[in-house]
Amino acid sequence: MNIRLLAKYWRTILVVAEMNIRQQMTDGFILFTVLFQPIIIALLGLWMLQDKGPDAAMFVVVGSGLTGLWSSLLFISGNSINFERWTGTLESLVAIPTPFEVIVFGKNLANVGQSLLSMVLGYFIAAFAFGYSLNIQQPLLFVASVVLAVMAFISFGLIIAPVFVMNPGVRAWQNAMEFPVYVLCGFLFPIALLPGWTTPVSYLLPPYWAAVALHGTSTGGASLGQTLFAWGMMLLFSLIDLLIASRLFKLMLYKARADATLGME
Amino acid sequence: MKTLSNNLRLFWQGALLSYIALFHWMRPIQYMASKILMPLAQMFFFVYLGTFATSADNSTFYVVGNALQIAAVSGIFGMTMSIGGDRDSGTLGYILGTPANRLVVFMGRAFMNILDGTLGVVIAFFWGVVLMGLDLSNTSIPALALTILITTISTCGLGLLMGCLSLITVNVMFVNNFVYFLLLIFSGANLQLDKVPAWVQATSSVLPLTRGIAAARLLVQGASLAEVMPLLLGELAVGLVYSLLGYLLFAVFEVEAKKRGTLEVF
């Protein structure tokens, strides 16, 4: 794959991301998922953890932002292919020379990117409504963690979307999949509180490593070694997810063409 | 007599069919995911968050609060979709074209959701006892059952109002998700209401669930039905006010929609 082709794909990703954000800003459900729900969770968390001080406030800001990232990935990215089906644009997108997974990557980038806004709003709520003086303890490491977390979430989303398309029964479990990940990934409390047998499950979830890196660098509670390990895990999972997603997209499009069900639910 | 029998038939048919329509697209296993796994996961999340915020000794506070909060799944989402579904599926025009008693049609939408919501809360309490160490040895179970029923009725009252709003807005999912999540804050399921700002307390006092949750917590601590009766009556009154508001809005909406020709305009 040459640099020119990659640059073309990147341009496509950015255009798709921009279009996606423009479209979604008028959808109440999406606005709720990426903005209002994380903010309500942040408010609730800030009230519940108000006796624990500023470190807990930072934990809540980052954690509630992560809930927004996951919910957006599950409900919006999960339906990103189905959305094209519903609007009748799936056939055109599949027929163009740009690989379909590049398009979906751009959509996921938009979903994950706009979800980060909830973290920023949560920060301002904690600072102005609750009067916390919040400082990100390791700003450079935090920014790098955000970039890697975005990558890990997008890659994970590239698996979820084709799985939901090929298995409508699995998609019906969407509602039941939201809170378990909040719990297992330690978004708003440490997973040490959970029974020991759940820990390996947490380790297998990329959002868990994103939470480790973001919480650790924002509160200064993680050593450099721990942060680097979390980064490594995010990169590893991103790579594995991209490989699996590539196979899944091929399988999905083959099945859709063979069964003549591309535009059908 | 014939009118009464017709209205009873209409009520039952409306209740049953709207409920079947609500879940017709699901298989039993997916219904279980929505009604059992999702509430359980939500309970776990808030109970762990609450015990992390305070201490493990307070788990009962969060288990009881979040178990009662499950009433809002049927009360808000179920009700909104039962009523709003008529518009989505194009049947609203037919319903409003019939001479059927509007109050019976309207209340029929709530009936199965009340039963379903009550069952959801009972399941949540079951999970609380089995998985989260909730101790009901000092609790009057009949009084707790009455509390669950009244709280679910009251939450469905708010759901009726939200359902009517869903007839005049495109963003139904925004509205009901927003109300559902606000209840997580304002109902006191996860917060000690005496420790939050006055405006939060004031808002809580006019919402369903608040008094029901407070009553359930007292019952679990060993209070008698007589001690919590004022809270239960208050809870019921709040629910009735919301139901009445919902019914009035339904009536106004029907007249306005017919006048403007916007019955099924999104």
Image: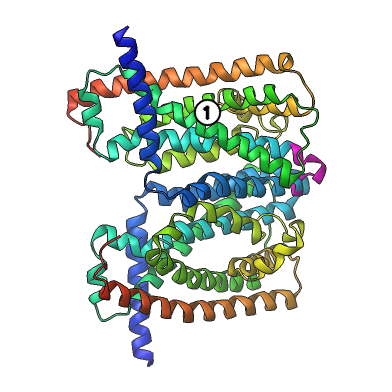
Residue located at (48% from left, 47% from top): B31
In the foreground, B54 or B46: B46
Q: Quadrant of residue B238?
A: top right
Q: Which residues are magenta?
A: B52-60
Position of the C terminus of chain B, as image quadrant, is top left
As drawn, A187 above or below A246: above
- Secondary structure under badge 1? helix
Three-letter residue code for mark 1: Thr
Task: Judge whether residue A102 is colored magenta.
Answer: no
Residue located at (75% from left, 58% from top): A195
Q: Quadrant of residue B212?
A: top right
In the foreground, B215 or A4: B215
Position of the N terminus of chain B, as image quadrant, is top left
As drawn, A165 above or below B73: below
In this image, B94 relative to A132: left or right?
left
Q: Does residue B166 show up?
A: no
Residue B245 is situated, as x and y percent measured from the top left of the image, at 42, 19
Prevailing secondary structure class for the magenta stretch in the rendered image:
helix
Quickly name the residue at label 1.
B155
Residue A100 is situated, as x and y percent measured from the top left of the image, at 33, 75
Task: Judge whether residue B53 is colored magenta.
Answer: yes
Residue A240 is situated, as x and y percent measured from the top left of the image, at 53, 80
In the foreground, B41 or A35: B41
Residue B47 is situated, as x and y percent measured from the top left of the image, at 70, 45
Say few, some or many: other residues with alpha carbon within 10 Å of mark 1 (under 14 / 14 to 19 / 20 or more). many
Count all numbered tags in the image, as a single digit.
Answer: 1
- Name the subunit of mark 1: B
In this image, A156 relative to A56: left or right?
left
Q: Does residue B140 show up?
A: yes
